[in-house]
Image (spheres, grey):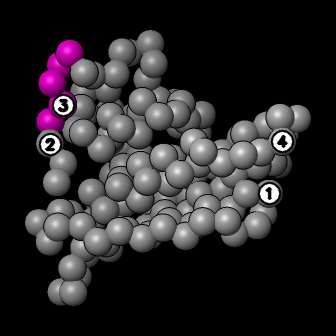
Amino acid sequence: MDHEVEPKDWTHLADSVKINEQKEGYEHTIQIFTDGSKNEHGVGSGTAIYILNKLTHQIKHKLHDRCSNNQAEQMAIVKALQAIETVKINKNIPRATLIHTDSRITLDSLKNKKNHNHLIEEIRKTVTLE
């Protein structure tokens, strides 16, 4: 479950996330597709990771029933970012990553410098989104 992060652990404003929702014509080595879901059967998240347009990872997690759909979406992003940290790619190929999410709340939370929830901070500390 998500919780507030102590002020000493907040991301510094100089390291804030920058989000551009789409860059047309830009080639991304890694593409991540995420989704979160909450229904009568429970809460879960799913992720598909493509490297050089080839599906390489599929990740799914069941979350506690008290978690929200937004937390499930954010957890999918966190788990995907953790997974790509260990991906081996030729040194000559840029590690440009594009994350596809349908979670407007997550995007708005990442833009909001006052939002210091744990999952949002985990995403912020892992990468800088442009």
Specify the segment rendered in magenta: 4-8
* Earlier-in-chain disc, 3 versus 4: 3
Query: Residue 119 bears which disc, if any?
Result: none
Q: Quadrant of the C terminus?
A: top right
- Which element type, helix, strand or loop, lies under badge 2? loop
Q: Residues within 10 Å of mark 1 (few under 14, many from 20)?
A: some
Residue linked to disc 3: 5
User: Which residue corresponds to mark 4?
Assistant: 90
Q: Amino acid at mark 1?
A: Leu
- Alpha carbon distance from label 3 to label 4: 36 Å
Tell us which disc is closer to us: 4 or 1: 4
Q: Residue furthest bottom?
A: 41
Q: Quadrant of residue 65?
A: bottom left
**Circle 2 residue:** 3
Q: Amino acid at mark 2?
A: His
At a point 80% along the width and 57% down the height, the residue shown is 52
